[in-house]
Amino acid sequence: MTRKKRHHHAAGPRSPKAETLPPPSSQPPVSSQPPASMDRDASERLIHAEGADVPQFPVRRRPPRRPHVERDGTSQTPPERGRNSKDTGRPPAPPPGDVPADLPSDPNVAARIRELEERLDRMISTHARDRGDDDSSTAMAPVPTRPPPSASSLPPAPPEPDGVFDTARELLSTDFYLRKWGRLGLRSRSEEVDEFGYDPEYERKVLPFFEFLYAKYFRVEAQGAHQIPAEGRCLLVANHSGTVPFDGIMLRLAVRKEHTQHRGVRWLAEDGIFHFPFLGSFTNRVGAVRACQENAERLLDHGALVAVFPEGIKGIGKLFRERYKLQRFGRGGFVKLCLRTRTPVVPVAIVGGEETNPMLSRVEYLTRAVGIPYLPVTPTFPLLGPVGLLPAPTKWKIFFGQPLDLEGYGAEAADDEILVGRLTERVRSEIQGMLDRALRERRSVWFG
Amino acid sequence: MPRPPRTLAQAGPAVPSSLGAVGRRPLVVAVTGAAGFLGSNLIGSLEEDERIGRIVGIDSGTATTAGRKTRSYDVDLTQPAAEGRVAEILAAERVDVIAHLAFLPTPTHATAWAHELESVGTMHVCVAARHAQVRKVVMWSLTWLYGARPSNPNFLTEKHPLRGPTSEPYFADKLEAEEQARRLTQRSPGTVVTILRTAPILGPTVQNALTRYLSRKLVPTMMGYDPLVQFVHEVDAIAALHLAVLRDVPGTFNIVGDGVLPLSTVIKLAGRIAVPVPHPLAETLTAIGWVAQLVEAPPSFLRYLRFLCVADGQRAKDSLGFSPAYTSREALLDFVNAQRLRDVKLLTETAA
């Protein structure tokens, strides 16, 4: 900065570039062409290197071996290159070592050296094959030139006094452990999440648990997954179920398993859960998105498969005696959304989810003060503490209905409240019909 | 992805229309807060642009980047007579565009002074701009003003109401400043008022509350919360201001980098240790720390560590023609690069 100040006080015209020079080792914030491109390259390099938090031991770089110039001036590079490609980077069997600069003038000696080198090449390659070596990180490293202890007759290579100490210093520094810590913290997390916070790596980590719930615990059966289009935007509309809603994640698994294209469902979750610690960030990472028009529209614009539970919080808060009686479908927001974005609607009925935590009563007294809408009372919940919230192992069935095409109405139909209301009711009665049919056919809550 | 100079070069076709209003002479741009980070870098950027005839720096200090084109005036916007002085300067220099950047990037304990500078200072600038019939006012603002709330959509558009914590002077003053700018649009419809709401700025040289937060060895986070965050690179922020100076596009624009990152990933990419603190405890500790001047921000900033406040930059791409050269992640990595050098004292702090 003082340097720049001096520039400023100096009289006379200066090149504008000089004014905007940043501190030497940092990138310029002002946008002039060459530095900006350097910036860009630098950051790209950094991304590709991804060395951001990899603990890096000092890589020992030895000077590449000098090509052996023969008497007649031809160099021995071809065997040299051949060796490098085969080389494993491990300290090989006793090499002839660095050939001293004063090469023996005798052609016999030169031939002998060549022969020795060829033997060495063979030894290295067999050695590499035996070890099944795949150490690619050091494969490109030049052949070590340090002479083995036995080759005492040869002049010693330049010593490397700090090799071990570098490692020791690295291990003793707090920075190493800080980076290690960072790596550990990110071990189950993706490098990048999508714009709604879905983390594939994290989902992969928790998937066994969900798979267990899906296959063993709830024994989910899905029917009619072929109704979902193979690509393009689509809205799944389902009944919301259970005091602790597992329906979003089960629906996601069902579509991934049963659909021919294994599409990933993004489901919209009530914003209530985003108030809570752990719950909000967890559901967000495994694919839920906060339910609001803006988010749904953005997802559908990207051609996503979106699931909504238009009953919302009322659906989760259904008492046991109200089970499978669909509540009001919001204000028809999902129909407006589909009309505006020309999205087909697939009605979905989820049977079994509404018996997992049979809610006997809702306590709303003083719960708002804590930030929750009500306290559910199930046969087990406040009685057994948090364990009481474990879902009962009911048999689940998921039915996908005929897609409802709203294309014919046009985008302006979204402003027609009467039509929106009628279409909402149509979807609702369709799902209610599917639910009723499934309930009639069901013989047992536990075995389906 | 186009780089900032290219986007500036693309601004070419827009210039004749903006110059048409004032004839053929090159633009005269006044920059308030010229000695600040944004001000000095914008001046540096404008100095290199041949479409800019003269730059008028208005601040109590001098921009370190001031060159041949720049004339600096020593004006303290917190003084009661500042509006008259600024109006005189604007009229005398025949200023076409004011870039109003006299805002504090970091919260301060001197809240009364900050109020005079940001809220009242913006009023002074708007009054002076109206008086001197300046054609355009470009103002810097923050996407943080939308407020971090669990009920926010994942991407806030410019239509979204500003629901930042008004109890916090840092946000209240900036909200008032935006209100002043809006009032200017109503009072003098001929004036183009462009407000650029930037995401938190990161980069190798910028310093603000966020860079201080990420410079700690132990970074406090709110236990159980991991909001998505976004950044904009300093180069992009300055390029956007430069674009807004050249182009006549009234309205408000979110200036953000592409992509979002979870806060936990941000801290780990920065090579720091996250220390999860239960949020009620954190609020108390931060309140004490703020009074004791041990932390960089008052407790109302903790909401941004819990809830979403991510803006949608589509409008700036469509109308302003601004496309960020750095994604949020690249901006962060660029900052981390420089921060590493600072950590080992290879790079000394600059007062930019």
Image: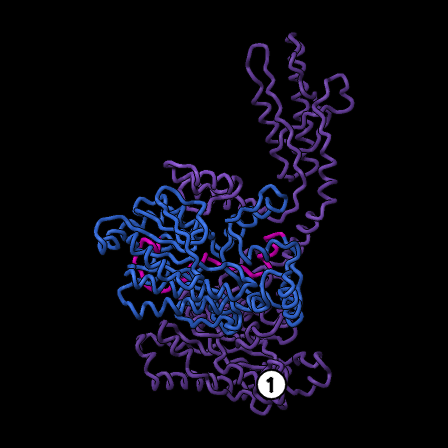
Q: Residue at x 60, y 80 (%)?
A: A371
Chain B palette colour: blue
Q: Amino acid at mark 1?
A: Tyr
Membership of A160 in magenta stretch: no
Quadrant of the rendered image containing residue A355: bottom right
Which sits in the foreground, A147 or A305? A147
Q: Which chain is purple?
A: A
Quadrant of the rendered image containing residue B79: bottom left
Indicate whether B179 appears above or below A67. below
Does residue B310 appear left or right of residue A160 in this picture?
left
Q: For the magenta stretch, what is the residue range? A: B243-271
Where is residue B292 shown, x and y percent of the image? 65, 63
- Secondary structure under tag 1 reads loop
Which residue is tagged 1? Answer: A374
Indicate whether B9 appears above or below B266. above
Q: Residue at x 22, y 54 (%)?
A: B20
Q: How many marks?
A: 1
Indicate whether A199 appears above or below B205. below
Does residue A56 appear left or right of residue B68 in this picture?
right
Where is residue A26 shown, x and y percent of the image? 52, 43
